[in-house]
Image (cartoon, rainbow, N blue to C red):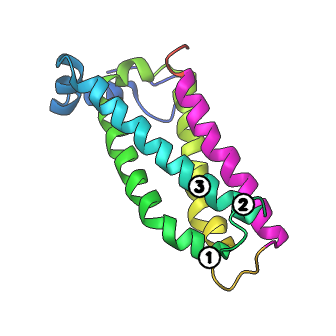
Amino acid sequence: MYPLHPIDFLPYHFFVWCGHTAIGLWVKETTWVFPIIETIHLMCLSIVLGTTIMVDLRLLGLGLHRSPTAQVARELEPWMLGALGMTVLTGAFLFMSESIRLSVSGPFFVKMMFFALALLVHFTIHWKATAPSTSDGAWFGKVAACLSLMCWFGVALSGRAIAFL
């Protein structure tokens, strides 16, 4: 039997299994698949960050003053959710191709923790702060915007650190 992962919440054999799936092997062994998927992943993450920044700056009162926050959030939501879905899908493909290496990567686990927090913040307090019933400029919206920005930038920066550590 495989030993437990040092963080002890997922057994090592889970990472080995992911690396030996058809998708993991295809991405790892085909010359151009990994860079193409990684490019799509980064482009979609850029869309997620861009739409989130626009809504958060509106919540902070730093941009798009002519439009209510709820309208800005509603108009950008399809872009954000579509890009988020593609980011998760491409991220799963990338993970499967490097799962064994990532099983001991500290930045990867930090990224996953930030990602879980970002999703939690986005789909709870951020949605409440951008609801039509919430007044623009409320302190709750400013807190939600700051938490959102910290979490999403944490995802991006720790994801970048995966390549170096």
Residue 6 screen position, x and y as percent: 53, 22
Q: Quadrant of residue 21?
A: top left
Residue 88 screen position, x and y as percent: 38, 46
Label at residue 70: 1
Under mark 1, the amino acid is Ala
Q: Is residue 79 above or below residue 109?
A: below
Crowd tier of the residue under label 1, counting other residues whose Cα lies within 10 Å: few below 14, some 14–19, many 20 or above: many
Left or right position of 121 against 25: right
> Principal SS element in the magenta part?
helix
Q: Which of 150 and 114 is in front in this view?
A: 150
Instruction: Assess whether residue 18 is covered by the magenta stretch.
Output: no
Quarter of the picture containing the N terminus is top left
Question: Is tag 3's residue or tag 1's residue first in the polypeptide sequence?
Answer: 3
Find disc 2 in the rendering and name its residue.
63
- Residue at image position (65%, 74%) is 67
Left or right position of 121 against 14: right
Crowd tier of the residue under label 3, counting other residues whose Cα lies within 10 Å: few below 14, some 14–19, many 20 or above: many
Say what secondary structure mark 3 lies in: helix
Say what secondary structure mark 1 lies in: helix
Under mark 3, the amino acid is Thr
Q: Is residue 100 above or below residue 137?
A: above
Q: What stretch is highlighted in magenta?
A: 137-161
Label at residue 52: 3
- Residue at image position (59%, 55%) is 52
Question: Is tag 1's residue or tag 2's residue first in the polypeptide sequence?
Answer: 2
Do labels 1 and 2 touch, CB within 8 Å? no
